[in-house]
Amino acid sequence: MFEWMRNHRKLSIGVITLFLLFFIIIMPFVLNWIYYLRAPSDFYDVGYKISSILGYYGAVLTFIGTVSLGIITVYQNYVSHQKTNEINKLTLELQKKSMAMAEQRYEKEKLNEVKKNTPKFEIKNKSSNGHYMNLQAELKNVSNIIVSGIKSVSLDVYDNTSAIVTTSHEVRSKESSLSPGDKAIIEFHNDELRSKKVESGRKINESLLDLTIIWSFQCEDQFGNTLYFKAEFHIEDSKKFVDGPWEVQKVG
């Protein structure tokens, strides 16, 4: 009913206005006119005065007015409830959008914070005893934080078939902590990278091609967290010494 009245506002106002005009202004005159008509039979004679009848009619109108006011109040409450639900729904949508934006901003800030507090290194070769034997490399802290507890995990050299050519567990460094911009010399103590063949009773040494050196190491950040890194360096020909750079990435 309320929906129909809201959808047909002008028609509803017109019908209500006509009813009010008829029952408030015209109906009393109709009752007064009927009262003074000659009754067709004694059955229709009444013992009430016209004032009593009009007073009763006034009481009925009062009752109808009270009911109408109640209906209007209920309708206003209904409309207010509908608007409140719409406002709450819009507020909830805005809160969800704001929360989603806040989560995205938090994740971005969290990622930036992680990147900011993650150590970064650069590695370049400094020298060797030929064919990358006993290779020495320079490890530089290029981040803005202090790193400590630098330890080697392993040094492995692979050929182009991913087979291990040589391994060294004697990796040494005089420095175990590096401030931002500081450098440390890493001594790998590895074998020379060249093949040894015997032809016609003679030893023939040949350089090795297409090799990959992988050095795994660990360190601690400023919060005492242990982080793991892997550095890779590709060698096209082991007889040609190249200073790098190495490719360093965090793996854990």
Image: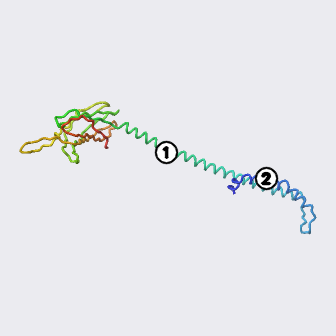
Q: Quadrant of residue 124?
A: top left
Secondary structure beneath label 2: helix
Disc 1/disc 2 C-alpha distance (Å): 52 Å
Could you tell me how many numbered marks the image carries?
2
Secondary structure beneath label 1: helix
* Percent position of residue 244, x then y: 26, 35
Q: Quadrant of residue 220?
A: top left
Give the crowd class for mark 2: few <14, some 14-19, many >=20 residues within 10 Å.
Answer: few
Whether residue 74 is visible, yes or no, is: no
In the image, 155: left or right of 83?
left
Image quadrant where one finds the C terminus:
top left
Disc nearer the start of the sequence (1/2): 2
Give the crowd class for mark 1: few <14, some 14-19, many >=20 residues within 10 Å.
Answer: few
**Circle 2: residue type:** Thr
Q: Which residue is mark 2?
A: 17
Question: Residue at horizontal 11%, vertical 44%?
Answer: 197
* Percent position of residue 138, x then y: 25, 33
The residue lying furthest to the right in this view is 38
Q: Quadrant of residue 213?
A: top left
Q: Which residue is mark 1?
A: 100
* Dot 1 and dot 2 residues touching (CB under 8 Å): no
* Percent position of residue 109, x then y: 43, 39
